[in-house]
Image (tube, rainbow, N blue to C red):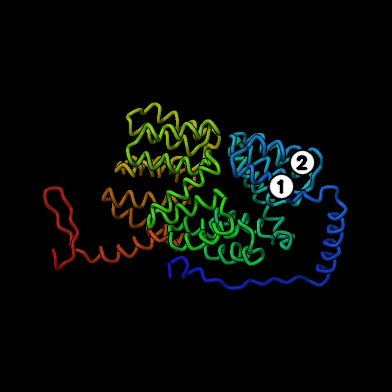
């Protein structure tokens, strides 16, 4: 059993409500059911599913028009402003997304889903300082009426929000993602969230186990297929390649895959191909921060330092404290054995977000490769205390136990650590 799977064991989570709550909720459900039966739009669920399909296929303009038309005619459902805002974010229009979501909240004042997407929109529209107040609103809504947010989508999105705030991954898996899957086994989000959580912890076997199940139920979902490709890439490159081809057939402009392929070309020193894919992403969103961070790293490798700095500045122009920009630049430079520069960028990321775990993990690895063992191992210990489920951190901690028993040999500027018998 994997580390993540072994630690995060499932326990059924039940919940109960006072009889008074159940009575008035039953009456409300009855009223809403009758209203739905009398509605002039009996196919509204199918219509929003169709719009979601357009979004997944990268047909953003058609999806936006359909969502906007539904909102204009008063179609009920927080899903419509969410879809419209998702399109606006995908096209690099975060200010428009803020307007869409704030207008939606005038009608759906209780919506946590709209607020969670608004957080992201505020950050990328230069209003990150408003996010803490929004977090407080979300917390208050959940505390006041927790029963309202027990459907699969709310559970997953709230769980992801808690993870970002530093919640324990095992608790999130059990009380949010697994609970969401139990509440709605046919919904795509819970099983996708379970797979992506395993990916984040670098537990690829567990991720593949979850995502294979999801791919059977959603064979044309680009997000699920791409996540599965990442999970199986190290064990089955042919299957991973086939999955990526299928994603591009569904959506030729699927940004996460385009960026992934651009990174692969970057690693293989196929810089022209990498740049071409980056430019393809930037035609969709001219300020896409991950694409600009990748181009900054590429410019650094090519010796175009001023261009690299300009790309980094542009990547941070919409959200100045976004730690992912310097993390991405540093991670890519370290893949080219430029560990000192990589470590510098990880420190910049941690200046923006001191508890940003990806940067902590990467900086620890960079420092160990630079021979700065004392600080490197200290960071490994701190990162593992914050995240007990990351496979690489677990392996590093195990390695440290062995290295501590090695003998150190020094000669002509070289430091070699060996088993005492071999030394």
Q: Which residue is mark 2?
A: 70
108 to the left or right of 6? right
Residue 162 lies, in percent from the top left, at 58, 56
**How many neighbours does mark 2 have within 10 angstroms: few (below 14), some (14-19), or many (20 or more)?**
some
Residue 46 lies, in percent from the top left, at 73, 50
Q: Quadrant of residue 17?
A: bottom right
- Residue at point 27%, 48% (across, down): 370
19 to the left or right of 98? right
Residues tagged 2 and 1 counted as in contact (Cβ below 8 A) = yes
- Residue at point 26%, 66% (across, down): 402
Q: Is residue 210 above or below residue 105?
A: below
**Where, quadrant-wise, is the N terminus in this rendering?**
bottom left
Q: Along the polypeptide, which appears first: circle 2 or circle 1?
A: 1
Q: How many marks?
A: 2
Q: Is residue 161 above or below residue 273?
A: below
List the single residue furthest toward the left.
412
**How many neighbours does mark 1 have within 10 angstroms: few (below 14), some (14-19), or many (20 or more)?**
some
Q: Is residue 174 above or below residue 374?
A: below
**Where, quadrant-wise, is the C terminus in this rendering?**
bottom left
In this rendered view, identify the residue nearer to me: 403 or 43: 43
Q: Which residue is mark 1?
A: 48
Residue 85 lies, in percent from the top left, at 66, 40
Distance from label 2 to label 1 (Cα)? 9 Å
Residue 271 lies, in percent from the top left, at 36, 34
- Residue at point 49%, 31% (across, down): 314
SS for tag 2? helix
């Amino acid at each position: 059993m994997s580390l993540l799977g072994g630690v995060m064991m499932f326990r059924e989570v039940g919940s109960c409500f006072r009889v008074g709550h159940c009575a008035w909720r039953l009456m409300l459900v009855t009223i809403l059911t009758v209203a739905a039966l009398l509605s002039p739009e009996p196919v509204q669920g199918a219509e929003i599913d169709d719009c979601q399909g357009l979004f997944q296929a990268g047909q953003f303009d058609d999806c936006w028009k359909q969502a906007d038309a539904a909102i204009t005619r008063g179609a009920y459902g927080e899903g419509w402003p969410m879809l419209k805002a998702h399109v606006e974010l995908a096209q690099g229009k975060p200010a428009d997304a803020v307007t869409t979501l704030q207008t939606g909240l005038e009608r759906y004042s209780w919506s946590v889903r709209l607020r969670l997407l608004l957080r992201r929109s505020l950050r990328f529209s230069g209003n990150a300082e408003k996010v803490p107040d929004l977090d407080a609103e979300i917390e208050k809504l959940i505390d006041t009426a927790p029963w309202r947010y027990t459907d699969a989508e709310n559970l997953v999105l709230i769980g992801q929000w808690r993870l970002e705030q530093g919640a324990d991954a095992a608790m999130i898996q059990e009380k949010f993602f697994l609970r969401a899957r139990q509440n709605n086994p046919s919904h795509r989000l819970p099983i996708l969230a379970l797979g992506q959580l395993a990916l984040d912890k670098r537990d690829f076997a567990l991720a593949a186990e979850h995502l294979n199940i999801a791919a059977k139920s959603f064979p044309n979902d680009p997000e699920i297929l791409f996540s599965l490709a990442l999970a199986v890439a190290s064990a089955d490159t042919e299957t991973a390649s086939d999955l990526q081809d299928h994603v591009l057939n569904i959506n030729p402009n699927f940004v996460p895959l385009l960026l992934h392929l651009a990174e692969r070309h970057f690693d293989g020193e196929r810089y022209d191909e990498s740049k071409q894919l980056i430019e393809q992403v930037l035609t969709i969103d001219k300020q896409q921060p991950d694409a600009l961070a990748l181009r900054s790293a590429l410019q650094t490798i090519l010796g175009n330092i001023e261009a690299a700095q300009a790309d980094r500045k542009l990547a941070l122009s919409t959200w100045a404290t976004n730690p992912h920009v310097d993390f991405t630049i540093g991670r890519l430079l370290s893949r080219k054995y430029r560990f000192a520069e990589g470590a510098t960028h990880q420190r910049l990321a941690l200046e923006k977000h001191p508890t940003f775990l990806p940067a902590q993990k990467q900086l620890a690895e960079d420092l160990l490769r630079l021979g700065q063992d004392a600080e490197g191992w200290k960071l490994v210990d701190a990162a593992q205390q914050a995240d007990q489920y990351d496979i690489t951190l677990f392996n590093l901690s195990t390695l440290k136990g062995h290295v501590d028993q090695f003998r150190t040999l020094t000669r002509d500027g070289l430091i070699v650590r060996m088993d005492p018998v071999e030394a």
